[in-house]
Amino acid sequence: MWFEGIDIFRLMVGTGAIVISLLSSYHIITTKDDVRAAIGWVGLVWLVPYVGGTLYFILGINRIRRKAVRVRREKLALPERQAIKLLQQSADRLPSNLPIAYRSHEGLMERVTQKPLTDGNHIQSLLGGHAAYGEMLSAIGAAKKSIALATYIFSMDDVGRSFVSALGEAQKRGVRVCVLIDGIGELYHFPFASRALRKLGVKVAHFNRTITPWRMGFMNLRNHRKILVVDGGTGFTGGMNIRGHHAAPNDQKRAINDIHFKLEGPVVSHLMDAFADDWTYVTGDLLEGSDWFPDITVHGDSKNYAIARGIPDGPDADMDKMNWAIRSALAMAQKSILIMTPYFLPDRLLVAGINHSALRGVEVTVILPEKNNLPMVSWAAQAQYARLLNSGCKIYHSPPPFDHSKILVVDSFWLLFGSTNWDSRSLRLNFEFNVECYDRRLAKELIAHTNRLKEMAEPITIEKVQSRGLFHRLLFGLAWLFSPYL
């Protein structure tokens, strides 16, 4: 026979490798919409048989199916639909002398998000963990009807225990409490907060828990949102997880600087809606009624109203909403762009947008942490500095401790804040939540904060970049090759 003398085991292994590579390649070619990602995955599954196919199965396939969310949106009269009726004229409150680019941006974002701008909001920036956690715990302590909390990391340190205690006390008072923790994020700290919360009777759910082998395909699809909504009317969002690192300003090694935000007014319904979608997806339960979605009301002094909209983003029906928002914001800028982020790995389209703005004469400032908690991300980011500096962008390294803040400010008027980083993981793989708003008062506060940082920061010049030694050029370049996977 033709196969006499052939090692049957080797034949089986070789045939299996070809079959797996063919099936993987078929799936990649027919489902991927990014040609670079498709080429990279096809190359990996053929060059490293079995290993490449396994990695693609675990990390490369989007398994999120939001049928539960679609059912919820069909069954319920959602607050956003009420907002469309009640606040459909919100865009008219934008100053009439705004450049046409702003009007175009607003039209694009309404079509992309299917959410209206909401008027009558008050937004407060909370610098650092002490300010943010104090306000959040105070709101939880005053809760009368409902508390919805979503976080990526929930550490059982001093800060985490204070939240567990406050949530447990609220549960005892008869407040309806739902806590959603990411299935991977909770693993950052042991013992687990979910166990302590359940002992107090609090409802806890995990987003895409992956500790069992058949769930490993969800490892790369994380819920990175940070949302707290109390009584449907007071909301908090931004970049802070629940962990003591944000409240340790004197500990340079473990301290993390960050900015969180307190929101009051109709835009809070957008935070609650994002949480309710995630809760339904994970548990199958519908959160409905006035406890979670009270009537929409304005808040504060009309002279200080913020016009705002929530933007959920994730690898499902909400795919690329943040990409659209950022690209449009870069295009509409007339005078200035301020970018502050801990992880700066923009793709070529975002880099082109930044450079295009700078070449138009817009003052572009990028503030990044000098010391990053993920060194490889910092190395990869530095590989792109030259192409930004050559276009006239200004780059600063803020001094330690590590700064986790994520803000984008355009023309001292339009702002974007939330959980999204400027990297592929946030923009393509994670579930994120951000808020865009028009608020000169808030923009002024954040610009003042970043100006104080710039006074202590190290300016990065093209001369410094060009004077790098061979070792650092090679190190940064190699790290940049892995940027799509960081």
Image: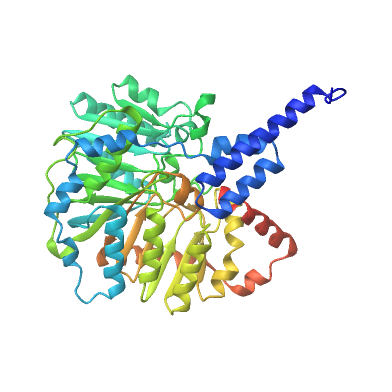
**Picture coordinates of residue 39, whole percent (x, y):** 61, 51
Q: Residue furthest top?
A: 199
Evaluate whether residue 33 shows in this view.
yes
Residue in the image at 28% along x and 21% along y: 201
Task: Return the residue nearer the eye: 2 or 15.
Answer: 2
Task: Return the residue nearer the eye: 430 or 54.
Answer: 54
Residue in the image at 69% along x and 42% along y: 46
**Picture coordinates of residue 369, whole percent (x, y):** 51, 57
Quarter placement of the N terminus? top right
Residue in the image at 53% along x and 62% along y: 348
Residue in the image at 34% along x and 71% along y: 411
Q: Is residue 71 left or right of residue 303?
A: right
Residue 149 falls in image quadrant: top left
Evaluate whether residue 436 shows in this view.
no
Residue 27 falls in image quadrant: top right
Whether residue 386 is situated above or below residue 123 in the rendered picture: below
**Picture coordinates of residue 237, whole percent (x, y):** 32, 47
Q: Is residue 337 left or right of residue 236?
A: right
Whether residue 339 is situated above or below residue 36 in the rendered picture: below
